[in-house]
Image (spheres, rainbow, N blue to C red):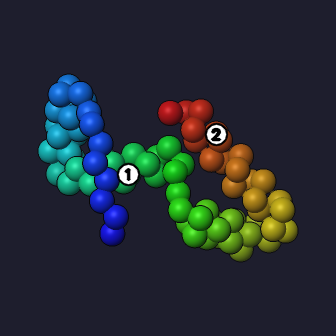
Amino acid sequence: MPRLTITLSDERYQALKEAATKTRKSLVTVIDESLDFYGIKTGHSATELVAQARRRAALSEEDALELAMQEVNQHRKQA
């Protein structure tokens, strides 16, 4: 698994640690969930999301992709 080094302000780092403690999760998990929340997914995850949408709605690949993109965009606007 690749490693990443980031620089945060002391305040941001403290807030991240507090969020992890309050939710009883690791820093990695909090960051990972935050990336998911903002719709940052791997290509495989995005492909699987489209496949799930197609199975559930019996949509064409094009229609399923459009629906998935609408959902992602709507989710991002709420954030």
Q: Is residue 21 above or below residue 4?
A: above
Q: How many marks?
A: 2
Image position, residue 22 (x, y; %): 17, 42
Residue beneath label 1, please? 33
SS type, badge 1 = helix
Q: Quadrant of the N terminus?
A: bottom left
Q: Give residue 34's position: percent from left, percent from top.
A: 39, 46
Of residue 35 and residue 6, the one placed in the foreground of this image is 6
Q: Quadrant of residue 76?
A: top right
Residue picked out by circle 2: 74
Q: Name the residue at 17% across, 40% down.
A: 17
Q: Residue 53: name its quadrant.
A: bottom right
* Circles 2, 1 touching at the beta carbon (< 8 Å): no
- Label 2 – label 1 distance at C-alpha: 18 Å
Q: Say which of 5 and 70 sits in front.
A: 5
Residue 11, given in percent of the width and then of the height, sits at 20, 25
Tag 1: amino acid: Glu
Q: Residues within 10 Å of mark 1 (few under 14, many from 20)?
A: few
Q: Secondary structure at mark 2?
A: helix
Which one is in front, 49 or 10? 10
Mark 2 crowd level (few <14, some 14–19, many ≥20, 10 Å Cα): few
Select label 2 or label 1 by which is in front: 1
Residue at 77% x, 62% y: name it: 64
Q: Tell me if I can see residue 41 in this picture.
A: yes
**Three-letter amino acid code at the position of disc 2:** Gln
Q: Is residue 66 above or below residue 6?
A: below
Q: Residue at x 33, y 48 (%)?
A: 31
Left or right? Give the position of 74 relative to 79. right
- In the rendered view, would you say 59 is above or below 34? below
Instruction: Tell me if residue 22 can be seen.
Output: no
